[in-house]
Amino acid sequence: MKLPIYLDNHATTRMDPRVFDAMKPYFMDIFGNAASRNHSFGWEAEEAVEKARKQIADLIGATAKEIVFTSGATESNNLAIKGVAEMYAEKGNHIITAVTEHKAILDTSKHLEKKGARVTYLPVQTDGLIDLDQLRDAITDKTILITIMYANNEIGVVQQVKEIGKIARDKGVLFHTDAVQAVGKIPVNVIQDNIDLLSLTGHKLYGPKGCGALYVRRRNPRVQLTAQMDGGGHERGMRSGTLNVPSIAGLGEACELCNREMAEEAKRLSHLRDKLKDKLMGELDEVYINGSLEHRLPHNLNISFAYVEGESLLMGINEIAVSSGSACTSATLEPSYVLKALGAGDDLAHSSIRFGLGRFTTEDEIDYTANKVIEVVRKLRELSPLYEMAKEGVDLTKVVWSPH
Amino acid sequence: MAYSNKVLDHYNNPRNVGSLDKSDPSVGTGMVGAPECGDVMKLQVKVNPDTGVIEDAKFKTFGCGSAIASSSLATEWLRGKTVEQALEIKNTDIVNELSLPPVKIHCSVLAEDAIKAAIFDYKKKQGVHSAEAVTA
């Protein structure tokens, strides 16, 4: 086993060597512009792009023509939300989303609010799921889009997408889902789930960075978007710009591998995740899982070690790459807004660690990680005045603190 | 973010971890910060009432590595100082010693506050217990 150990697969994944192999010919040998219609260089590039389109579509139950290539999920999310808001402006100006969405959704929504749109940010329950009745109640005759993520990037909670899709369909509202964490990890099917728009990206499923896609439904209903980038009219006019052929070939291959290996991989990773969880919870007291265990990605564990601050824990396990919801590890010096939205209290957000397992995670790595985390948590609790007080029976919620 | 070697040293080998008897009149206890802010420091000093010299100092800290290092360093500096000398320790001294980056300056402020709170607690106890306070 080699150190450091990478357990931050919600941030990004290592490229699968098979994906890299699939990309190689398209850098120097097959370098044509996929939009060049009158010579073999262009045809070969186009062939690669169309193959990838099919591979991606097959993974999510779509047809190839419904896949629009983008630079990644942030662009896909921007294109979906802004594109719908502009195209359907005459129908309405109301968008529904949730407070635990990724910033690419929240900040895009805020941008539209400044331009006159009305946005409802649904709260989540303590398990991280939105309340479907609240969603139903939020829909008005001005609602044009519901955008709810498939699976959360921090807590791995998988929303009840099928039910959300059905509600949206019944009310005649378009449904977009940011599915970057779910696609290739759990079964996603745009037909069964009534999804109209779906964002995905290469680097979360062992493919290249800087390349993603937006699924745009073509029938029942036919979804239209206002392009957000003007130019040569590529991608059915929805996203201009010369296609990134090597990365698209890689994204396609990555999707095909996921399609083939997902079921087996999910089983293996959920076993390892449960082993890690059981070991941590068996050996340490006052350990809390953030978000629903039942509705969760198989490779995610987000867990809070009470009375231990996250950054100091990361420092002690510095040969294990994970992330924390602690304020000290964020650029804004605010604890995770996702964990705060669960209502568990800021102190547990400060104490949280996100483990993201992946295709290359081994059992040895999980055993090592569990032992190391247990050792460091114990050491830091010896240092923690809060742990001492809790052991003395002091109710920490009743103490008058001096916030600073 | 990279930590300085001194922060790493204090994190890996924290000095003077522990607790002193809170009810001892020669012990002053300072507890600052709040769990929801992500750091709480408890710093205690044991003072020789005759000489005013801090004979022992202990800490426990819930917080990031820089907060742990700041309080660990504070206990090192407090030992052997008089109460009045201890009050002269400034957060900037801690920043310089540990090479703390700007985002971690609040850790040093918290350590200075903890020192002051501990000494204040000691003085308050002495005020109650000493004859001088009674006659005053």
Image (cartoon, coloured by chain):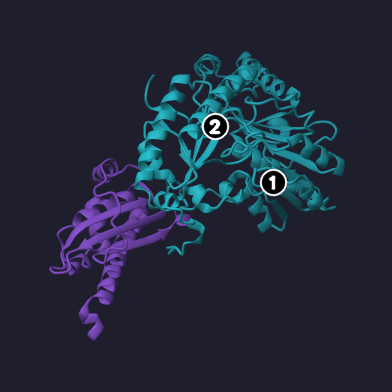
Q: Amino acid at mark 2?
A: Gly
Which residue has dot 1 on it? A82
| Residue B60 makes an appearance in the image | yes
Q: Determine whether B86 is above or below A212 in the image.
A: below
Question: Foreground residue, A182 or A313?
Answer: A313
- Callout 1 and callout 2 share a chain: yes
Residue found 22% across the figure and 76% down from its top: B130
Colour chain B appears in: purple
Q: Chain letter of disc 2?
A: A
| Percent of width and height locating residue A253 | 60, 18
Residue found 60% across the figure and 43% down from its top: A102
| Percent of width and height locating residue A110 | 64, 54
Q: Relative to A353, is A101 on the left or the right? A: right
Q: Determine whether A80 is above or below A18 in the image.
A: below
Q: Amino acid at mark 1?
A: Lys
Task: Estimate the spatial distance between the alpha carbons at disc 1 and disc 2, rounded to whole Å.
Answer: 20 Å
The chain whose colour is cyan is A
Which residue has dot 2 on it? A210
Which of the 4 image quarters holds residue A248? top right
